[in-house]
Amino acid sequence: MSIKKNDDITLKIEDMTNEGSSVGHYDGMAVFVRGAVTGDEIVAHIIKAKKNYAIGIVKEIINPSPCRIESDCPVSDKCGGCSFRNMTYDAELQYKQGRVADAVKRIGHIDAPIKPIIGADTVDNYRNKAQYPVCIANGELQAGFYAYKSHRIIPCTDCRLQHNSFKDILDIIAKWVRANNVTSYDEQTGRGLLRHIYIRRAPMTAETMVCLVINGKSVPNEADLVASLKQYDGVKSICLNINRENTNVILGNETKLIYGNPTVTDVLLGKKFVISPESFYQINHDQCEKLYTKAAEYAGLTGNETVVDLYCGVGTIGLSMADNAKRIFGIEIIPQAIENAKINARQNGITNAEFFCGDAYDGAKELEKRGITPDVVILDPPRKGCQKELFDVVEKMDPKRIVYVSCDSATLARDLELLQTKNYQTLEVTPVDMFPRTPHVETVVLLSHKKVDSYIHIDVEVGEGEGKIPVDSIAKRAEAYKPKEKVTYKMIKEYIEAKYGFKVHTAYIAEVKRDLGLPMYDAPNAVEELKQPRKYPTAEKVEAIKDALRYFEIMEEI
């Protein structure tokens, strides 16, 4: 029995996807439903039906899961931020633990100890940064977050994840918007002034930065805006970020300070850190301290080691370890972050740290040319993971240990498998719940250089007679040798589902390969002519397929 749009079906929820959607099976077909919980028995209303899967919404909960709770947020079913407001925190941690373990084993093909996830003491009000998209209708400011997989704004000024002060600041900006007839940016026309409201608060000092991202050079009645905001306790920095590009990227390349300091200062693991609008800084202070403490444990510093901190941001990881290291070298591509890192070293009296602005690969190459031989390399890349070429340089540096910090378990597993080929083995994996109530999870991993403990010299003589290996024995072994298994469509599909949370049809993979001029081979459902011609895959699925092809080294980087 096939599923059709607008059908109502009874569904048992079996699992969760990487994006936080629940999944069950109906007559052998996967059905994805947001808002359900593993163990729920529901009536799902189908809103999209494809040949191999369907998407539904919860119409009725027949038998709730033991781990189901009532959501404490009125927009959690609409907003694309929180996925687990209706699930106990213990169940959420169990899900994230399993997700990391599955990725490491299934994608990375690595059998390593997965330590218990480090959970959070609080799951509310932990975010120290918010970037609100805005819409102004009839002079009224609507700030909130995007609906799931859309750019439709769900108004929400009192998000349970954000600090309580953010709502007060938004109210101040809303009054200024009304008084000055401020317009909001329209993605379709490219017109309108206000694009985003960016608020960053240093948890330990309460210093707050307010940044308006605008499609222009200035704002009307700037003086009134500044006068209103600076009265709010803790506001130390007010700035305008100029972004006039037709892009989904939030921040532009120019930031204009209109009040106070260009940075705010926070305290992390006993050290002071200045943070600019463009700089990366972990959004959960307390969990960040737990994460960096575990990273320091994995680094195993005694005071004699050289540490290379790639993707160093404002220097938080490296500088937090500096007291126990001989030398620290940090590489970061964002210039403002490097300037922050240098200031952070000076204000903490750290003299054994150097920071360089550049791409991780280019920076690592430069350090390798200078003869820097690190004992420990720290990797903390963005969600897409490390570029493959970087591992070639790391291999030449020959560190004893690598500490890998990741916010994406799929790309982490991919990179761990690549590091295996560079003579590094994964010793231990620890998930850290940096982002409670969301599907995201941080992970820190310890890798060690594979070194043989001793060598045994063996002389082998081929031929007939005592102590010799017969030639026919060698021939039999050669005949029995099986080359490395070729990459299959199934492997590509499994990789995409694990990393992106959706499935792709075999025919889509074949079509992308054909377009790229890659060699083809027979596979079920990958035929030239289909009984019912299939639409070409969406741009999102094309990029996911290309990513998988690069991962399995079927094609070069394009």
Image (tube, rainbow, N blue to C red):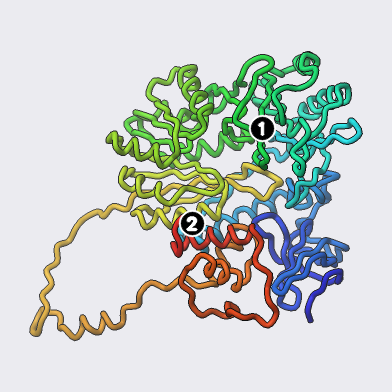
Question: Furthest-right residue in view?
Answer: 138
Classify residue 531 as left or right of residue 68: left
Comparing 200 with 73, the one in front is: 200
Q: Position of residue 49 (x, y in %)?
A: 77, 70
**Labels 2 and 1: the sequence-earlier one:** 1
Image point 48% across, 19% down: which residue? Answer: 348
| Residue 35 in the image: above or below residue 494 | above
Residue found 25% across the figure and 84% down from its top: 476
Q: Residues within 10 Å of mark 1 (few under 14, many from 20)?
A: many
Residue 529, image x, y percentages: 62, 81
**Tags 2 and 1 in contact by the CB under 8 Å rule?**
no
Q: Secondary structure at mark 2?
A: helix
Q: Residue furthest left?
A: 465
Locate residue 157: give its quadrant. top right
Where residue 266 sits: x, y (%)? 60, 23
Image point 84% across, 22% down: which residue?
176
Pick the front one: 546 or 57: 546
Horizontal and vertical percent for residue 188?
76, 44
Give amino acid for label 2.
Arg
The residue at 54%/39% (across/down) is 291
State which quadrant residue 231 falls in: top right
Q: Is residue 185 left or right of residue 440?
A: right
How far is disc 2 from disc 1 in space, using C-alphas? 34 Å
Q: Decide which of 240, 426 is in the foreground and name it.
A: 240
Q: Secondary structure at mark 1?
A: loop
Q: From what the image shows, is residue 224 above or below residue 49?
A: above
Marker disc for residue 182: none
Q: Nearer the viewer, residue 394 or 151?
A: 151
Looking at the picture, which amino acid does disc 1 mark? Asn
Q: Which residue is mark 2?
A: 414
Q: Kindly identify which numbered label has been placed on residue 243.
A: 1
Q: Quadrant of the N terminus?
A: bottom right
